[in-house]
Image: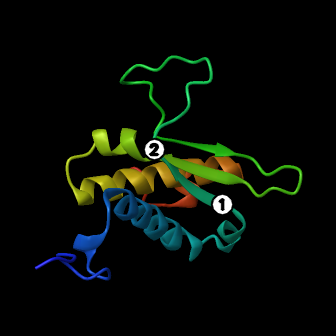
Amino acid sequence: MRGPIAPPQVPLAASRAEAFADLVQDSVERLERRWPQLADIDFLVLEVPRLDGQSWNDEAVPLGGSIPAREGRPARVVVYRRPVEIRTKGRDERAALVHEVVVEQVAEVLGLTPETVDPRYGED
């Protein structure tokens, strides 16, 4: 019998990249309730950060980044999937780290502290 093991709407059918993107989206939706202006920010998932002449070691590899709005382009928040996955063991731990990275980057874009963006920041 050929065909998929599970229908597409079942989480088993989601790739690791799709599941990770869902974690980022969940985090953004959590924050949008308090910060509706996040609808004007693009949230991206990239596999790894670019080197751009910088060298990274295991402790210095960024987990995310932000690009301010300019020239008619919205601000962007980027979460790097592979560095986050490497630092986490399970889905709950990964979700917590993704949320922490999203909060930190949103704070950077908005010019606020992470604790202002999410009062529960750092409690996990």
Residue indicated by mark 2: 47
47 in relation to 103, above or below: above
Label 2 element class: loop
- 67 displayed left or right of 98: right
- 94 displayed left or right of 56: left
The amino acid at mark 1 is: Asp
Single out the mark in the foreground, 2 or 1: 2
Q: Is residue 124 visible?
A: no
Marks 2/1: CA–CA distance: 16 Å
The amino acid at mark 2 is: Glu
Task: Locate residue 102, reporting x and y percent.
Answer: 51, 54
Residue indicated by mark 1: 42
Q: Are marks 2 and 1 in contact (CB under 8 Å)?
A: no
Q: How many tags in the picture?
A: 2
Residue occupying the point 20% across, 79% down: 6
Residue occupying the point 38% across, 24% down: 59
Numbered tag placed on residue 86 in the rendering: none
- 8 displayed left or right of 121: left
